[in-house]
Image (spheres, rainbow, N blue to C red):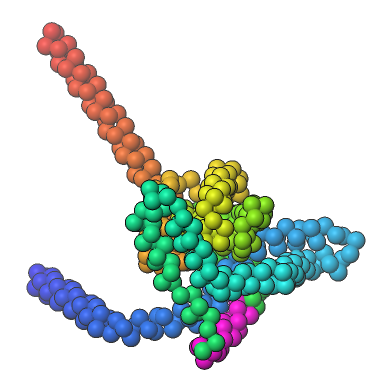
Amino acid sequence: MNNKKKNKGKLTKWLYWFLFAVAVILVYKTLDNFSAIGSWIAHLIDVLMPFVIGLLIAYLLYIPCRKLESVYRKTNKVKFISKRARGFSILTVYIIIVVLLIIAINYLLPIVANSIIDLVSNLQNYYNSLMSNIDNMPDDSIFKNEIILDAIESIKTIDLKQYINMSKLAEYAKGAIDVAGRILDFFVAIIVSVYLLLERKQILEFIKKLGRAILNKRAYRNFGKYFDRTNSIFFNFLAGQLLDGLIIGIITSIAMLILGVKYAISLGFMIGIFNLIPYFGAIIAVIVAAIITLLTGGLWQTVIMVIVLIVLQQIDANIINPKILGNQLKISPLLVIFAVSVGGAYFGIWGMFLSVPVIAVIKLVLTDYIEYKNRLKDRQEKYKKRQELIERQQDKEKQENTEINESK
């Protein structure tokens, strides 16, 4: 019997070392072929990107589709529509989006494009005018400071015409081919989003059944809870930021038009897009808008425009944005800045945009875990104190019984 146990122990030991050696070899081969694995992963991500975009589109359109579906289901007089409420709701939402895109392409895009071309064409004239105004200022003026003069000089070195150059038609043609491929991917994403919206009930039921099959009761309950809360955080953030960016873009465009700022609509459009990036986006947008206004409109118009933008940003940060998001994230500004910095450093523009809801979910899970562990420790401490109290009571009773016996 002892020999069998020894042999079994040796076999287990050798099996452990064998598995450890296999793991080391696998890690080494993975690191040795890291570039090949990286390119394979990059290709896989490129292939799956239309499906990811389709999932994101379906995710953003879920709420309006669901509300329209409930409206169509109430039209009992027209049974043809009520029976096909889901399909009609998706069709209606996409028609509205197409109409909005047509309006934007016909009216907004030409204004933005013409503004960019005009700015690039007249950049040298704007620069010369700015330098002439600075030269006419007194010698003790703050704008004749060496740091400011160096910053203005650096603007001159930016040759934006290199990006709009007829000699680069070959590069533009290649870019157009890439754009055509992306357009095809986008159409695939649209089709994917339509099917996801049509079959969302079956997909959610499958996920729930899968979770129930592979998880225990407690883990499944936690999975459902965190799935719902994570979904709420992401949807409120994505939909809220898009709506907030649109509102800020319109308000700032109107304010700049009133102030007579050149390229007002283009700058407002830019500020609305940059506003999607928490904290840093607004700062970058104001700086860029201030530089362009300084070149095109002069110092006082720039000062007034910056003051107006700062006021609008404060109104957005304290009134508009909290109302839209409903204070769902509940994370400190320091954590937001950290999330945006790390997300932007490792994942670019998407990292800056999505890092805030991701860090909010991590904070949610971590906070729940800390509270659970603290409750567990409090329970253990209470149990320990209760046991100590019971033991003291028992010791006291034993001592009293001993004293009674000794007195007898």
Q: Position of residue 293 (x, y in %)?
A: 54, 58
Q: Is residue 239 above or below residue 398?
A: below
Image check: 356 left or right of 386?
right
Q: Residue at x 46, y 66 (%)?
A: 349
Depth check, front residue: 215 or 61: 61
Answer left or right for 126 relative to 389.
right
Residue pictured at 51% horizontal, 89% vertical: 167
From the viewer's perspective, is residue 359 above or below residue 350?
A: above
350 inside magenta stretch: no
Tell me the quadrant of the picture where the N terminus can be found: bottom left
Front-most of 138 and 346?
Answer: 138
Q: State whether the magenta stretch is mostly helix, strand or loop.
A: helix
User: Residue 5, position in %: x, y?
Assistant: 13, 70
Q: Is residue 46 visible?
A: yes
Foreground pick, 276 / 131 = 131
Q: Position of residue 244 (x, y in %)?
A: 60, 54
Residue 52 x/y as whole percent: 53, 73
- Residue 390 in the figure: left or right of residue 63: left
The answer to whether residue 55 is seen in the rendering is no
Q: Nearer the viewer, residue 37 or 117?
A: 117
**Residue 171 belongs to magenta span:** yes
Range of magenta residues: 168-189
Q: Residue furthest bottom?
A: 170
Is residue 384 toward the left or the right of residue 401 in the image?
right
- For the point 48% across and 61% down, which residue is it? 132
